[in-house]
Amino acid sequence: MLKKISFLIIISAVAFLLISCKSAIKEPAVNEDDSGFKLLISANMDYEYVSAFSEGLAAVYKDEKWGYIDKTGKLAIPAETFDYAQPFQEGVAIVAVIISSQDEGSIPYYGLIGKNGKPLAMLDYTSLDGFKEGLAPVCFENKWGYLNRDSQLTISCEYDEAFDFSGGLALVFLDGMYGFIDQAGQLAIPFIYSYAQSFAEELALVSKGDKWGFIDKNGKTVIPFEYDYASNFSDGLAAVGKGAYPDLKIGFIDKTGQTIIPFSYVNVSDFSNGVAHVVMDEGQERCYIDKSGQVIARDKDFIEIRKFSEGFAAVHKDGKWGFIDTSGKLAIANEYEWINEKGFIDGLAVVKKDSKWGFIDKSGQVAIAIEYDVMYEFVEGFAVAVKDRKFGLLDQNGSEIVPFAYDFIGHIGDGAAFVKTGDKWGIAELPRF
């Protein structure tokens, strides 16, 4: 009852604030800048935090409350409304209010709102995860079901646990066993598994008792329950093991169950970008292997090897950083003081040399001059950089899009970026390419 009364008070307040805010806020002037961006709002907005724009609105935070503004800086949904707010996706946003009582303490209650700020799904749920394949797991009175983007509870809250949909099926837990349901809420695969994971690459990892196997979406056993250890398929291979710890040995199988890489490792990672990190039994040697099981790089040959990304992995040796390719060859020489943790993204990597930052391409050529004090990876085709303690914005050609005149630039999304001078925020609309 407490949360219902509180919710009605909140919604009444939202309606009042929406009317009063719209009448009080003046339209800001739109200024053109020679750099190719439009300064929609100069840095005069007073928020403690902002999020990137999504579908024309950005969540803003002030005085421990969240609301939303549009690209002119107008409050579309007042920033005195919610205790939690996510970006809009497909016309709806997940929000929450925290309700406190002597008996229950402070509990967040989640729901959905439309772009007018009106509730589409009542703030009744103690958990509301993100949407996958049009449905989101929700928890009501300790039972789980699924909500659609039209705010309809299409699958009733009757499960002890519920997971995201993947490939049209969702893993659910009931009375101590796992099964799968379809998007209509019908039981597709019965509750006969002691443990299970969601479908990946058309197969799901499941267990009966203490043995692991794989099933297809019809519930048919594709790979028998004969493994003591297993992980989901990734890059077409799955790590599986036989034996009890510490005698467990791990190898890799394909989707027919054929052993592709023999059971000779004591620890492994999943394959990604065609490589996996493994620990060999002999001497606990650590190395990277390709999908044929061939060793392509050994940890002992480098101080550090990072994960592969787009066919390259950053390596540290002799005090400098470079890149190896998936054959283990040093493809880009060790000449950098540092390399961004993410490695290559869309063919470019952030590197540091002579205390300055820039970008190189996969041939090792400088793509954007190594002359900036700080550099960040690209988002929507733009990279934030710092020069002489001021922030600016570059495009993928290295051209200056937003001049180096701000104390902060970030939260890029939906063709716009937030700029900051002092403790005030502004909005820059970015050019389209």
Image (tube, helix red, strand yellow):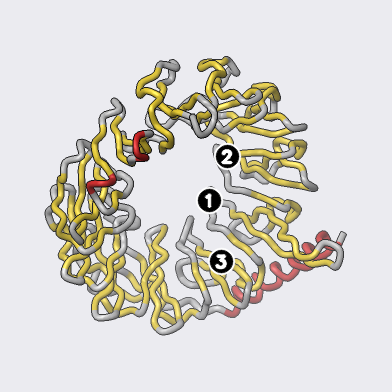
Quadrant of the image occupied by residue 378: bottom left
Contact (Cβ within 8 Å) of mark 2 with mark 3: no
Asked if residue 120 lies left or right of residue 279, the reply is right
Residue corresponding to mark 3: 68
Q: Residues within 10 Å of mark 1 (few under 14, many from 20)?
A: some
- Residue nearer the viewer, 167 or 184: 167
Residues at circles 2 and 1 in contact by the CB criterion of under 8 Å: no
In this figure, which residue is indicated by the disc labeled 1?
89
For the residue carrying disc 3, how many other residues have a C-alpha within 10 Å: few (<14), some (14-19), or many (20+)?
A: many
Q: Farthest bottom residue?
A: 422
Q: Position of residue 376 (x, y in %)?
A: 31, 63
- In percent of width and height, residue 425 lies at 44, 77
User: Residue 415, image x and y in percent?
Assistant: 37, 59
* Secondary structure at numbered mark 2: loop
**Left or right: where 56 falls relative to 392:** right
| Crowd tier of the residue under label 2, counting other residues whose Cα lies within 10 Å: few below 14, some 14–19, many 20 or above | some
Q: Are marks 3 and 1 in contact (CB under 8 Å)?
A: no
Residue type, label 2: Gly
- Is residue 235 among the parts visible in the rendering? yes
Q: Amino acid at mark 3?
A: Tyr
Q: Earlier in the sequence, mark 3 or mark 1?
A: 3
Report the residue marked by disc 2: 134
Vertical comparison of 116 with 307: above or below = below
Q: Which residue is painted at 29% across and 52% down in the image? A: 304
Q: In this rendering, does residue 397 appear at all?
A: no
Residue 29 in the image: above or below residue 289: below
